[in-house]
Image: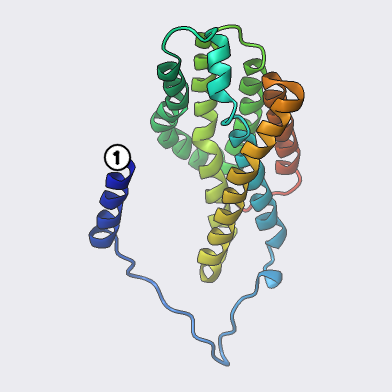
Amino acid sequence: MLTSFLLIVVFFTNLFGVYETNHRPWRKSSSQQRVRFNDLQKKKIIVNLYLITLLIQIGNNSISPIQPLYVAQLMNNTGNVNLMNGVANSVPGVACLVMSSYFGKLGDRIGTERILKMCLLATICFLLPMAYVTNIWQLLILQLLIGLSDAALMPAVSILLAKNTPISMSSSIFGNNQSFQSAGIVIGPFLGSFIANLFGYRGVFLVAVLIFCVLVVISKTLRYQEA
C-alpha cells in the first residue's frame, strides 16, 4: 500500500510538474540523416560504459539475497534481526543522500573519470573486509562506507555517457544503459545465490570484489571525453 501511494505521488508530480520544452522530433530528410550507433566516433567508449553499468549492478546486487541471512548469522539469530537488516539496507542510502552532491561538485573540479576510478577502488577496499566481519556493527560501518562510493558510481557513468553521446541519440543511448542496469539487477541476485550455495556467504563478497577489480581494469582501457 505504501509503495502504491508513493508511485501515485510520483505519477502526478511528473504529470503536472515536469515539462520538456526543447524536444524536436526527428524527421528523416535528404539534408539530415539519422545518426546510427555504428557510425558514432565514441562507440567504444559508450559500449565500455554499458559494460561498467552492467558489472556495477551485478556486483552490488549479488549481495542482496544473502544480506538478511548474513545479518542473522552475525547476530546469532538473536535480537531484532529484522530491524538491523533494515538498518543495514538503509545506511548506504543515507551516505548517498549526504555525499552525492559533493561528489558531483568534486567531479566538476577534478574530472568525472577520476571520480569513477577512485570510487571503484574504494568499493573494493570496503567490500573485502565485509567477508570477514565478526559482528553486526562492523558490517554497518562498512555498509556506510560502501554508500559513500555508491554515491558516485552510477552518477559518474551517467555523466560520462552524457558527455560522449550526441544529443540526437541521447534517449536511445540512455535507454540502452537502463537495459544493462536492469540486466545487472537480474543477474546479480542469481549469481550471489549460486556462489553462496557453493562457497558460503563470504564467497559472495569475494566474488563481488573480483567483479569490481575487473571494473577497475575496464575503466583504465579507454579515455573518456571530459569536454
Q: In this picture, is 82 found above or below 221?
A: above
Image location of residue 93, percent across then percent down: 43, 30
Q: Quadrant of the C terminus?
A: bottom right
The quarter of the displayed image where residue 74 is located: top right
Residue placed most toward the observer, 107 or 127:
127
Q: Is residue 53 left or right of residue 6?
A: right
Residue placed most toward the observer, 209 or 98:
209
Q: Quadrant of the N terminus?
A: top left
Q: Identify the residue position indicated by label 1 in the image.
A: 2
Q: Is residue 105 left or right of residue 160?
A: left
The quarter of the displayed image where residue 118 is located: top right
* Amino acid at dot 1: Leu
Q: How is the image coloured?
A: rainbow
Q: What residue occupies the far bottom of the structure in this picture? A: 30
Q: How many marks?
A: 1
Name the residue rendered at 65%, 43% in the picture. Answer: 187
Residue placed most toward the observer, 207 or 159:
207
Name the residue rendered at 44%, 79% in the picture. Answer: 25
Image location of residue 96, percent across then percent down: 44, 31
Q: In this picture, is 45 found above or below 2?
A: below
Name the residue rendered at 74%, 43% in the picture. Answer: 218
Name the residue rendered at 41%, 12% in the picture. Answer: 80
- Classify mark 1: residues with Cα within 10 Å, few (<14), some (14-19) or many (20+): few
Dot 1 falls on a residue whose secondary structure is: helix
Image location of residue 61, percent across then percent down: 59, 36
Image location of residue 162, percent across then percent down: 53, 56
